Image (cartoon, rainbow, N blue to C red):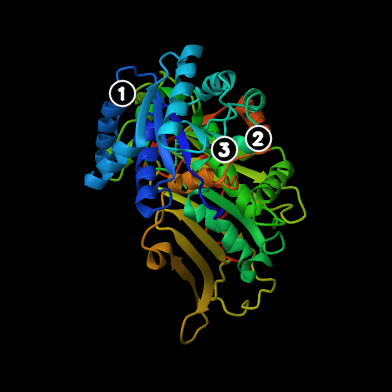
Amino acid sequence: MAEQEVERHLMVVIGGTGDLMERKLLPAMRRLTERGALHGKVVLLASGRRTSFDDESYREWAREALEAAGMPVDAEDSNWCDRCLHYQSVGDQQPEDFARLQQRIEELEREHDLPGNRIFYMATPPGAFIDTVERLGEAGLSEGPGWTRVVIEKPFGHDLDSARELNARIHRHFREEQIYRIDHYLGKETVQNLLTFRFANMLFESVWNRDRVAAVEVLVAEEIGVGRRGEFYDGVGALRDVVQNHMTQLLSLTAMEIPVEFAADAIRDEKVKVLRSLAPIDPSQVVLGQYARGEVAGEPVPGYTEEEGVAEGSTTETYVALRTYISNWRWQGVPFVLRTGKRLGEKRTQITIHFRCPALALFRAHAQATVHANTLVITLQPDEGFDLCFEVKEPHDPLRLQTHSLRFRYEDAFPELPDAYETLLVDVAQGDQALFVRADEVEHSWRIYTPLLAARSKVYPYEAGSMGPAEAERLLPPTGEVCPL
Ligand code: BG6
């Protein structure tokens, strides 16, 4: 979000031969260099367990990864790889491996004439980052000649206690101002725009409250199943995988008060206030589901328990619908309905604000004049944009109404949206923490969901390709609500 000058730095990616590096970080770095955003500013040191790589073979691997990501490597890319990419193994992560890493870091800083600013990016498998963070700290790498920042990816714990412990362990080595916890949803352009939409437009703020809003719905629907992540996902489930982090971020941004300034801590303070105001979720207001065989996009797909790595008879939820309430002046009594699932009939991330019905049943005398409550639909992906739906009179008599919308689509205005990782990498380099999750945010979020994890009971099957179990319908705000006449 900030627009400070990026200072020259070394980015050390631990897990530098892994999936995240291959699919997200390398392509994002490449695009940023191309756009000039990080050009000449960053030297990359990938680090991993593999001892068979050296700089040259790593560069070859990186070229292949870029090709696989649909970014054909031309001479300029090759130059970039040769100039900026290096590899250093950390083997089994023994103290001597980190001593060697430190040595290599210092050599590269001399070679590239860098001022000693360092980013340590933990692109390790889920949950493995904490050991590495501790090894870095023990090796004295948590402070360097310039600034030092550490980037970590979710999951940040699996319940409240583990999140507290993780935070405490990280804080033994790094100060909170050095820690960048990534929730990639915050890097999505459309998610960032939520704040601009709310606070740069006078139109919406005055109706953004319990007097005008009947319900708020947050949907994260996915067509994909668990793919190759079956074993990992089976120990996690949708509540931990998507609700506790991505969806709770969307809820906070939608519900938060106006920050005192457009700056990291002011924004994060307001998000934390929302989390602190969330009432305990009543387990009767939660429906869990698990996909059974079905058809998605015309293709037959297996049920969850038939997926590779998933335990036989597993009851892990792949779908959650829940109703929660924010006990504060603005939102008291307004249900916030969160709904997410894998193998649903469509991929769609959307926030829908359901407005209340008009105060007066003015059209009572006109039997045909059905009035629908207004909605504002904020589509975060795909087909990013806004639809403000309102009532219009059909021409001629008798009085009949139709719902139409004012429609904005990003692609009409902006041909290209940056990938979330491009935004987040620049923000880390600039030292702007606004789009990163603060320690207290993580803990407050787990405080809400941890009791539900223990109370998980029935998991309803739903057919892949449907929109989830029918049992969840009672929790959803009515779509196209007809106002009483
Ligand atoms: C990840 C989850 O954090 O987010 C995945 O672990 C999920 O299970 C993904 O598929 C969704 O992200 P996006 O950007 O595709 O909406």
**How many tags in the picture?**
3
Q: Secondary structure at mark 2?
A: helix
Specify the amino acid type for callout 2.
Glu
Residue 9 visible to an observer of this rendering: yes
User: x%, y% of residue 455?
Assistant: 63, 27
**Do the CB atoms of the residues marked 3 and 2 lie less than 8 Å apart?**
no
Mark-to-mark CA distance, 2 and 1: 34 Å
Q: Which residue is mark 3?
A: 180
Specify the amino acid type for callout 3.
Tyr
Mark-to-mark CA distance, 3 and 2: 8 Å
Q: Secondary structure at mark 1?
A: loop
> Which residue is found at the position 50% from the left and 84% from the top?
398
Position of residue 86 in the picture relative to residue 397 (left or right): left
Q: Secondary structure at mark 3?
A: strand
Residue sticking out furthest to the right: 329
> Which residue is found at the position 41% from the left and 49% from the top?
419
Check mark 3 vs ligand 1: CB closer than 8 Å? yes or no. no
Front-most of 205 and 468? 205
User: x%, y% of residue 253?
Assistant: 61, 51
Q: Which residue is mark 1?
A: 54
**Is residue 476 positioned above or below 387 on the image?**
above
Specify the amino acid type for callout 1.
Asp
Check residue 176 in the rendering and tell me which mark sits there, or answer none: 2
Badge 2 density bin: few <14, some 14–19, many ≥20, Cα 10 Å = some
Q: Nearer the viewer, mark 3 or mark 1?
A: 1
User: x%, y% of residue 137?
Assistant: 58, 22
Check residue 324 in the rendering and tell me which mark sits there, or answer none: none
Badge 3 density bin: few <14, some 14–19, many ≥20, Cα 10 Å = many
* Sequence-first disc among 3 and 1: 1
User: x%, y% of residue 47?
Assistant: 40, 25
